[in-house]
Image (spheres, grey):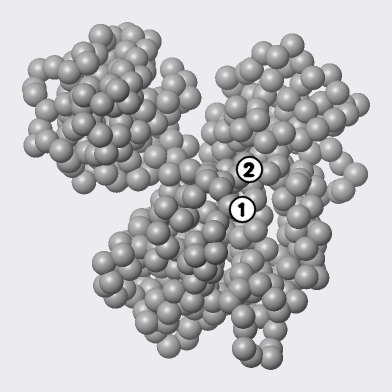
Amino acid sequence: MSEKAARALLGQLRGATKQLTLYPIDHPATGEVLAKLRQNADALSKDSVGEVVLSILGDSLYENRSLLAHASLEFNKLLRDLQSRGIESISFEYPVSEGDVYDLVAFAAGLSGDIPAGGTIRLNEGPFTRSELESDEAISGLRRSYARSLDVLRGVALALEVDEGFDLTGATWAVEQLVEQTLAQPSASLLLSTMKSHDEYTFYHSVNVCILSIALARLAGLPEDELKLLAVGALLHDIGKVRVQASTLQYPGRLNPEQWAEIKLHPQEGAAAILAAAAPGQEIAAVVAFEHHARFDGRGYPSLVYDRERHFFSRLVATADTYDALTTRRSYRRAETPNRALQVLLQGAGTFYDPSLVHAFIKMVGVYPTGSLLQLAGGELVMVTRNNDEASDYPDVVLVRTGAGESLEVPEPYSMQGRSIVDQVTPAGAGIDPAALLEVSGYGSA
């Protein structure tokens, strides 16, 4: 059974729990979401000889005995929500009844106390023991560090939302793990930084920026003790957005002056929150949050009243921040291709961005960064899995879609010798999730 099918089911479950908290059961949109969830559950359980079991073990999600490494991160918030409800496994038995689907979603959303026993959906009756699920393939240290960083950001955000204080102990611990894993597995870390989430954009974006910043700082020769200080600032650079109304952050069109003024306050809000939480020696994280939108030429926001140039950490994080933001779909614009994002950085070098850091960043990720989708002259669609060191060399790629238009569930290695690239396409345009494909290809298994 493919991870893609399981991810579809998890997406429907996440959407259904959200829908049920907003609209009643008799709302047409609610019925539609629940029907789609039941259809996905039916398809999975039927293909799995009548029953499929989703099990949660720590940071890992399993479909029967198979680890779903990518889905474990993609649906990290859903896993945490299910765990908070005491759910360790969900068993779907074909055919799944409509009433059981509603009971599951209502319980997962915290709207009911339990689900009836003996139905086609059962909780915590998984047939697999912990030892049967734990294996050498269990979620890696790098992925675990990513997941724990998400948890830290959620905790900090919750504290700020209720005007409670927090300290930087959790963030410091999380970035220490990320630094260790990124230095040990630089290529795998760059692969993992292609992870995207529309539902929790700020959190996933912040972890990606942290990984990219660590890798870029290492290339720039920053010692490890300074790397950790930089990483805290990178992880928390956007935390001030917690103070921005969700309706403004997710507004699908051009912001009006009041909304734009609210957005422009997030660097100050973030810096103030970090300063209040920082121990001596950690204040630089607040500087990064404050300066990450102030341009290289001194313009941008907020207006800086001091004469010195922005801190090196701030300039570095701004480069990584822009790249990840541009390559992620937002409510108000489509995602750009990695190559187009690099062009934007180049065009802004010397005005928006530090030119030395832009060129270092391009050297690090390559002309066609990992996860890039390239259209070839023969009609084939390939995905970059690794850039070679020499500029004249072709990148390593896998075939995603044949020239005849056939999509491959498991991409295959493909030679670029003699091939011509005619275009680079976005994941949305191709209907493809690069991070998930890297996973099933075996390149994102770190």
Q: Is residue 419 above or below residue 211?
A: above
What is the three-letter code of the residue carrying label 2? Ala
Position above or below: 334 against 39: below
Q: Nearer the viewer, residue 164 or 416?
A: 164
Q: Residue furthest bottom?
A: 307
Which residue is painted at 26% across and 10% down in the image? 94
Crowd rating for badge 1 (residues with CA inside 10 Å; few <14, some 14–19, many 20+): many
From this viewpoint, is residue 60 visible? Answer: yes
- Look at 38% across and 44% down and name the residue there: 76
Tag count: 2
Q: Give me the disc on residue 324.
A: 1
What is the quadrant of residue 355 in the picture? bottom right
Q: Residue at x 24, y 13 (%)?
A: 96
In the picture of the structure, the residue carrying the numbered disc 2 is 335
Report whether 107 appears left or right of 135: left
Q: Say which quadrant the N terminus sits in.
A: top left
| Label 1 residue SS | helix
Residue 283 location (% of width, % of height): 48, 83
> Where does the image place residue 365, in percent across and percent down from the top left?
72, 52
Q: Position of residue 306 (x, y in %)?
A: 64, 90
Left or right placement of residue 86 versus residue 314 in this view:
left
